[in-house]
């Protein structure tokens, strides 16, 4: 069955700590396979007052315009329009988070979609738990506005955006101006994967150079300074071949 092929089976796991409550008014799912729409709807149970569904790209664009959902889950393999076209069209007039869902795994495709305005990317076969977690993170960013707060915290790490100050357990951490600009850029889109090019453009503000090569050195240095264990980063997460995102656990 299609549904069983595109969902990951998971062993029983111990109960996780309760997630902070996040509830959207509505979420739009654009997916042409009814069994997958049902699986997505079940995964998103409790995250929205209602889940609106579209089976094609054109219908999804129309529903996005009419419904103005708080988030869109967008499949790439649609019968009428490419998922990239749907993403670009929605981004022309709306800024709600878009989480792309697809069986395609090419890194270049992920880069194109993220540069086109997608906020995250989940590949099939997908774990319902992972999909729910990624949607929850995007809703938290979009609805709660956590990324615009002046001071953000992650464990004993504090980042004060107004004062350009970083502290761990009360101890000041010195960042160079470029390191600070990278942190500020990532925190401003916390939970969202930014491509190498997006970060490079925001920090260096120029159109030449190798973004991946530049960033690799700076990210390594940043992790040495702000991660509890730089060899097992929990804050600055690498999306191989695509870019980086920062996770700020509550």
Image (spheres, grey):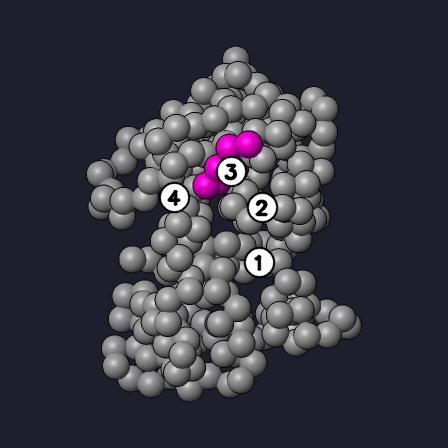
User: In the image shown, does 88 or 220 lie closer to the viewer?
Assistant: 88
**Mark 1 highlights which residue?**
194
Q: Position of residue 33 (x, y in %)?
A: 57, 19
Report if residue 70 lies within the magenta region: yes
User: In what element is the residue under mark 1?
Assistant: strand
Q: CA distance from mark 2 to mark 3?
A: 8 Å
**Mark 4 highlights which residue?**
136
- Does the rendering let one see residue 3? no
User: In the image shown, does 118 or 105 lie closer to the viewer?
Assistant: 118
Q: Quadrant of residue 47?
A: top left
**Mark 2 highlights which residue?**
94
Q: Position of residue 42 (x, y in %)?
A: 38, 25
The magenta segment: 66-72
Q: What is the quadrant of the C terminus in the image?
A: bottom left
In the depicted structure, whether residue 39 falls above or below residue 105 = above
Q: Horizontally, is 164 left or right of 167 in the view?
A: right
Q: CA distance from mark 4 to mark 2?
A: 19 Å
């Amino acid at each position: 069955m299609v549904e069983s092929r595109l969902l990951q089976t998971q062993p029983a796991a111990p109960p996780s700590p309760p997630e902070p409550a996040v509830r959207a008014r509505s979420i739009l799912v654009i997916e042409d396979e009814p069994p997958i729409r049902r699986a997505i709807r079940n995964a998103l149970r409790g995250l929205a007052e209602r889940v609106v569904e579209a089976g094609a790209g054109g219908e999804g664009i129309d529903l996005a315009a009419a419904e103005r959902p708080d988030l869109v889950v967008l499949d790439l393999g649609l019968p009428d329009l490419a998922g990239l076209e749907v993403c670009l069209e929605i981004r022309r007039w709306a800024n709600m988070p878009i989480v792309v869902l697809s069986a395609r795994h090419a890194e270049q495709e992920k880069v194109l979609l993220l540069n086109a305005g997608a906020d995250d990317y989940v590949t099939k076969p997908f774990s319902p738990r992972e999909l729910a977690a990624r949607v929850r993170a995007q809703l938290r960013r979009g609805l709660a506005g956590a990324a615009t707060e002046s001071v953000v915290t992650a464990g004993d790490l504090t980042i004060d955006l107004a004062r350009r100050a970083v502290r761990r357990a009360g101890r000041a951490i010195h960042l160079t101006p470029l390191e600070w600009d990278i942190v500020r850029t990532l925190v401003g889109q916390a939970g969202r994967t930014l491509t190498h090019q997006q970060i490079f453009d925001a920090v260096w503000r120029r159109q030449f150079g190798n973004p991946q090569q530049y960033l690799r050195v700076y990210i390594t240095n940043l992790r040495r300074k702000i991660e509890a264990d730089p060899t097992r980063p929990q804050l600055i997460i690498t999306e191989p071949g695509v870019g980086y995102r920062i996770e700020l656990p509550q």
